[in-house]
Image: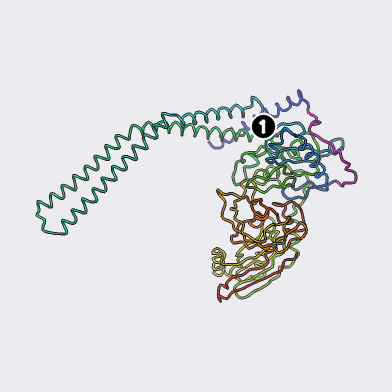
């Protein structure tokens, strides 16, 4: 049975695929598209600029000079669009892709993520992979059906008779609750009185029987009152239940239709790669933990750009994405700054779309490889603990691809230890002191010190910009950005408490040297607290995730650790001066 079902699904899939390809051929035959409207040529001279040897790694890159020139032209174009100014000021991600045409000319494509000015098709920019907003499309029709369901739900939920019935039922329930509560108090008082009489003694059998009958009568009266109140409340509750059931049925239908629409929509996003292979979003996300694509998948700038290059047989050379406008309230985005592609939406898509291209090694991988050649200095070691000075670029624990890390180095250094256990972690690009234990028992004790904030930590950072106040506290709750981990955002609803104390050490030209004292240990806490406008508004130098400018490293160093020795109880203080 299962085999027959799968076979039918495969046949249906192939039939739909053939129909789609046939319709695409008809469309191209009747509306030839040479891409001339979307392909732009450089107005500035590009003579002397070397072409990239490999294509951009979209998740970790420095923009190529050609991409910087292309982005500059797009930004000038955006600055001239008065009609979009209000929307652009709110902030949006744009992308550029430098290509070589079949005739050998160099040009570039531009794209925006999502929609702009209420549409996903605008002159100058590449079109969407699939235009879900086209009139008469199944998406628009089903979206209208779902909107109609929403309207029916709102009508039912705001119906005056329904709201009056809700208020009436609530008032009746409250009255019933108060009346029955008074009766329970009377029952309790009568029971106490009978108990007092019995304790006093001297009751005749007839008097005892009277007390028992009184108790039984009062309990029966209470049951009769419960039934009476239930009978009074029942008509209103029944009417409410009928309408509530209707509302729930509509909500269930809305959920079912929305899910079916999403899946049908995802099938229409047919993503190409450099080899000419095609996969839809459902296929691309099938092996991910969430199994289904997230909302908005395929609508980011990077997939749009690559899709058009492949459709027109243009060779992609390099790509970059930049933010234009104000930073969102939660995330940290800087106007005109370049950013990597988002991982949760784009990683499975771009992994497929880049097949057939030679792609640059991630800078993080290069930094990790360089760090693997460096020693791991030991600052302190005894029978129970080790303190090391981690170099920038080294992982705290092994990653998916990189095996070199503080933990793996310590496992080699202490092959007989019951551990070793990393008590706390530092970001790969952060250097400085890390604490290692040689047994699980000691690890548990030291983790308790971290959890109770009994460990003193001091970090040194060099910030881009001048911090006005000499010292203070930063309190901004942090949470992972849903579609772009490990990026963190300030979120007052679902964020966890994050507190950082800071002290300005030096101001020089356009930089501020500060000491950070984190009172909590959230992911990227110091980086976000430094960069966010509600924090210091001055990102750490070299922070490509939250900052503005590149540097030879992230200028953040864990300089000092203070803790209580887990065995001797003595106070320990460790220091490793910042290498910058």
As helix, strand or loop, the secondary structure at mark 1 comes to: loop
Magenta part mainly helix, strand or loop?
A: loop
Of all residues, the one furthest to the front in this rendering is 469
On the rendered structure, is 9 left or right of 223?
right
In front of the other: 245 or 5 = 245
On the rendered structure, is 517 left or right of 201?
right
Residue 134: image location, x then y, percent: 67, 27
Residue 428 occupies quadrant: bottom right
What residue lies at 50% left-to-right and 28% top-to-bottom?
152
Residue 4 appears in the figure: no
Of all residues, the one furthest to the top in this rendering is 30
Residue identifier under label 1: 118
Q: Is residue 439 magenta?
A: no
Q: Is residue 387 above or below residue 398?
A: below
In front of the other: 277 or 135 = 135
Q: Is residue 37 magenta?
A: yes
Q: Quadrant of the C terminus?
A: bottom right
Residue 435: image location, x then y, percent: 63, 67
In front of the other: 302 or 407 = 302
In the image, the segment drawn in magenta is 33-50
Residue 575 appears in the figure: yes
Q: Is residue 360 above or below residue 403?
A: above
Label 1 CA crowd tier, 10 Å (few <14, some 14–19, many 20+): few
Residue 55: image location, x then y, percent: 79, 46
Residue 448: image location, x then y, percent: 54, 65
Specify the color scheme. Answer: rainbow
Residue 538 occupies quadrant: bottom right
């Amino acid at each position: 049975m299962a085999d027959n079902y799968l076979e039918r699904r495969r046949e249906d899939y192939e039939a739909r695929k053939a129909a789609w390809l046939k319709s695409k051929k008809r469309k191209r035959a009747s509306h030839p598209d040479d891409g001339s409207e979307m392909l732009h040529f450089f107005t500035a001279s590009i003579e002397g600029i070397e072409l990239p040897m490999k294509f951009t790694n979209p998740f970790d890159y420095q923009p190529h000079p050609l991409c910087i020139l292309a982005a500059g032209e797009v930004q000038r174009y955006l600055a001239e669009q008065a009609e979009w100014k209000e929307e652009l000021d709110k902030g949006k991600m744009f992308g550029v892709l430098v290509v070589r045409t079949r005739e050998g000319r160099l040009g570039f494509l531009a794209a925006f993520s999502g929609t702009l000015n209420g549409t996903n098709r605008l002159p100058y920019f590449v079109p969407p992979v699939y235009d879900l907003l086209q009139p008469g499309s199944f998406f628009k029709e089903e979206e209208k059906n779902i909107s109609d369901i929403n309207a029916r739900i709102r009508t039912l939920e705001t119906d005056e008779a329904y709201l009056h019935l809700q208020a009436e039922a609530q008032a009746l329930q409250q009255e019933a609750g108060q009346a029955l509560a008074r009766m329970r108090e009377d029952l309790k008082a009568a029971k106490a009185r009978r108990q007092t009489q019995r304790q006093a003694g001297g009751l005749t059998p007839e008097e005892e029987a009277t007390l028992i009958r009184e108790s039984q009568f009062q309990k029966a009266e209470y049951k009769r009152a419960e039934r009476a109140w239930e009978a009074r409340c029942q008509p209103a509750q029944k009417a409410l239940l009928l309408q509530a059931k209707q509302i729930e049925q509509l909500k269930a239908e809305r959920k079912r239709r929305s899910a079916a629409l999403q899946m049908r929509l995802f099938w229409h996003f047919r993503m190409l790669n450099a080899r000419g292979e095609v996969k839809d979003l459902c296929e691309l996300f099938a092996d991910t933990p969430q199994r289904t694509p997230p909302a908005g998948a395929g609508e980011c700038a990077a997939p749009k750009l690559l899709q058009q290059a492949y459709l027109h047989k243009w060779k992609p050379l390099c790509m970059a994405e930049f933010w234009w406008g104000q930073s969102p309230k939660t995330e940290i985005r800087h106007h005109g700054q370049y950013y990597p592609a988002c991982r949760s939406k784009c990683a499975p898509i771009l992994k497929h779309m880049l097949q057939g291209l030679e792609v640059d090694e991630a800078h993080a991988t290069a930094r990790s490889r360089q760090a693997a050649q460096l020693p791991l200095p030991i600052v302190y070691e005894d029978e129970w603990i080790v303190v090391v000075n981690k170099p920038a670029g080294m992982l705290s624990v092994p990653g998916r691809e990189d095996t070199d890390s503080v933990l793996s180095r310590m496992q080699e250094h202490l092959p007989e230890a019951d551990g070793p256990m990393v008590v706390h972690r530092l970001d790969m690009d952060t250097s400085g002191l890390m604490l290692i234990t040689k047994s699980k028992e000691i690890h548990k004790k030291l983790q308790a010190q971290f959890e109770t904030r009994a460990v003193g930590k001091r970090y040194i950072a060099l910030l881009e910009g001048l911090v006005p106040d000499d010292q203070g506290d930063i309190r901004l709750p942090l949470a992972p950005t849903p579609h772009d981990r490990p990026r963190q955002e300030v979120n007052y609803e679902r964020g966890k408490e994050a507190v950082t104390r800071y002290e300005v050490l030096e101001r020089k030209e356009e930089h501020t040297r500060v000491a950070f004292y984190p009172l909590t240990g959230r992911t990227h806490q110091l980086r976000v607290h430094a960069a966010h406008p509600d924090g210091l508004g001055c990102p750490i130098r070299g922070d490509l995730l939250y900052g503005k400018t590149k540097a030879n490293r992230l200028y953040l160093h864990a300089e000092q650790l203070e803790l209580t020795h887990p065995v001797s109880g003595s106070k320990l203080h460790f220091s490793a001066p910042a290498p910058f």
